[in-house]
Image (cartoon, rainbow, N blue to C red):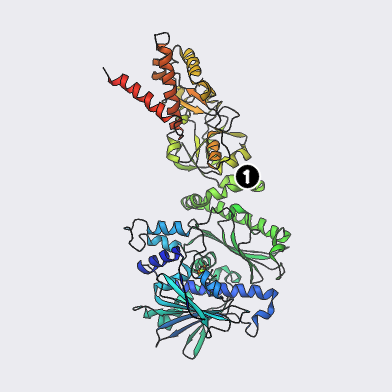
Amino acid sequence: MAEERHGFQAEVGRLLDIVTHSIYSDKSVFLRELVSNAADACDRLRYLAITRPEILADDPKLGIVIEIDRAKRTLGVADNGIGMNRAELIDHLGTIARSGTASFLDEAANGGAPGAPGAKNPALIGQFGIGFYSAFMVAAPVEVSSRKAGEGQGWRWHSEGRGDFAVSESAEAPARGTKVTLHLRQGEDDYLEPEHLRALVVKHSDHIGFPIHFKDGGASHALNSASALWMRPKAEIAAEQYADFYRHHAHAADEPWAVLHAHAEGKIEYTALLFVPSSRPFDLFNPERNNCVKLYVRRVFVSEACAEILPGYLRFVRGIVDSEDLPLSVSREMLQNNPLLAKIRSGLTKKILAELARKAESDAPAYIAFWENFGAVLKEGLYEDKDRRAALLGLARFRSTAGEDWATLGSYLERMRPGQEAIYYLSGENLEALRRSPQLEGFRARGVEVLLLTDSVDEFWIPAIGVFEGKPFKSVTRGGADIDKIAKPNGADGQPSDAPGIDNLIALMRLALKDAVKDVRRSDRLTDSPVCLVADEGDIDINIERLLRQHRQLDEVAKRVLEVNARHPLLAGLARRLGLEGAADDIAEASWLLLEQARIMQGEPVADPAAFARRLTQTMRRAYEE
Ligand code: ADP
Ligand code: MG
């Protein structure tokens, strides 16, 4: 069959652009990526062989070979793992399956002149495992020849790393598995030096559980210890080895924020080597909420992203679990509702939460960095996992009106004011907008702290929990917030009294606004602003309603209560007009303006922009015209 040419998926093209044009600080990562892929291929074949032992044929020892040819200036990385057929070569080495790639590429290339290739932010590339395509940093063309286990036909893939690649049948493909051959670019001769290569493998790939051999002409020798890293004693494992193991298994490029290496014995026996990433993986909020812990049974890889190993709210955890008790022939169906796995899951969840608590205690700034990455995910556990609610509440951190620092619920309780009965919160999308919200005025004046919540998950766990240490959670956007019972600090009561006639004014406003609001009421929560909107007690919270409308779960907008600051000079002025000629019309116009203003403060669109503009112009004319 003749050679067929295929274009790279657009994302791959952009990635290759970034990879080949940017001055990447450490090009040698390509070797780690290729060895990592070779090890994955061996893992996958070993798994297949559990049910189909014949697939190993007469080559049962899985391994990786690194080979150099000085005359041709090539470096090869070969494995006798699962291999790829034509369709897989086109699919796996022509596209990027990982979600979030496009947005990552946008971010990485941000700030560049239009059309200019290359990343403006190399640090970002460092966080994204560039995988196979990293080979093009040091080589062009790159050749891949492969034969899939159990299939007869071999295939050759090659590309210059620009725009397209070619695929053709090949008689020279390995008997089974894949060989990647790099034609090194000018100036990359270091990668023909055995010592340099050996040092790189020892440094970055020693954790690989398959033998890696180095072949230079006729001679061949082993480069690694080829034992599973997680079975070695902790004391013998360097931080760097843990980090490389993490990057291999998580397909990540950052440093682990935390490493948890644990062995459990007794009724069930397993070893876990788990990691918390230091940066947010791009697919964290995928609807599947897959977790990414790999399951091994007695050193044999069994399943990827096993959802049974950890609860969804710990899906940011990466790593492996190796069970001594499960049967090797365990099928994916058997993994579901497996009592053994349920025990492992509960044991690991406890260990992870304990480790987080320890970190929170020992290194608060580092813990906050973790919380900013994964707090929103961890909070899902507050309504999903009742048994661990207390532990999770202890781990939770909050923004609040008490300052720029993060608060805990415990510290909030300590700061409660005399007479304060509830834990007050305000939720919305944007922290700065929340801080400016008029609904906070009365709370500020009384020195009452309000938690500021910006994660959508907050709308779910708060109602699910309802109460913390006897104190109910209360949204400040609701009526009946009861803050009038809380004394102001130092008895500061030098405030102006209610405007005379305010009750009549409110009655007129009610008449003017009719069905646009549920009610107009005097407010306890305002000090500086004239009005604000609140949800009536028992009605749906304003922020939840906004969320529901965004997700098209709700068409109707519940009517709001317009609360009025009875001490505000503007309202006092309006009240003074009562009884004058034309007062009813003036008050009606002002009521509508105030209502629209309250909507704007709430981050909601003006209901009738044209009428709003007309009223505003008229009011301004009255102020500025003679
Ligand atoms: P990742 O390893 O994160 O999936 P890569 O870019 O490193 O991404 O590799 C892309 C895909 O190509 C892999 O997922 C795998 O399916 C396939 N692949 C790469 N190298 C090999 C290999 N040596 N043997 C079999 N498949 C491979
Ligand atoms: Mg890879």
Name the outermost residue toward the left.
626
444 left or right, relative to 236:
left
Give whichever of 571, 101 is nearer the camera: 101
Where residue 171 appears, x then y in whole percent?
Answer: 53, 85
Does the beta carbon of the residue at mark 1 sit less than 8 Å from ligand 1?
no
* Quadrant in which the C terminus is drawn: top left
Is residue 394 or residue 46 the one in the foreground?
Answer: 46
Quarter of the rendering containing residue 608: top left
Q: Residue 477: give x, y in percent of width and height.
A: 52, 31
Q: In this rendering, does residue 506 appear at all?
A: yes
In this rendering, the answer to whether 36 lies above or below 468 is: below
Position in image of residue 48 (x %, y %): 65, 73
Residues packed near mark 1 inside 10 Å, few (<14), some (14 to 19) or many (20 plus)? some
Left or right for 33, reference 381: left
Report whether residue 178 is seen. no
Image vertical order of residue 167 relative to residue 381, above or below: below
Q: Label 1 belongs to which residue? A: 383
Q: Looking at this rendering, what residue extends furthest in the front direction?
A: 2
Residue that lies at the very extreme toward the bottom in this rendered image: 218
- Residue at 60 percent of width and 33 percent of height: 472
212 left or right of 610? right
Residue found 41% across the figure and 56% down from its top: 107
Q: How many marks?
A: 1
**Where residue 338 sits in the image (x, y, percent)?**
72, 60
User: Label 1 sits on what residue type?
Assistant: Tyr
Secondary structure beneath dot 1 equals helix
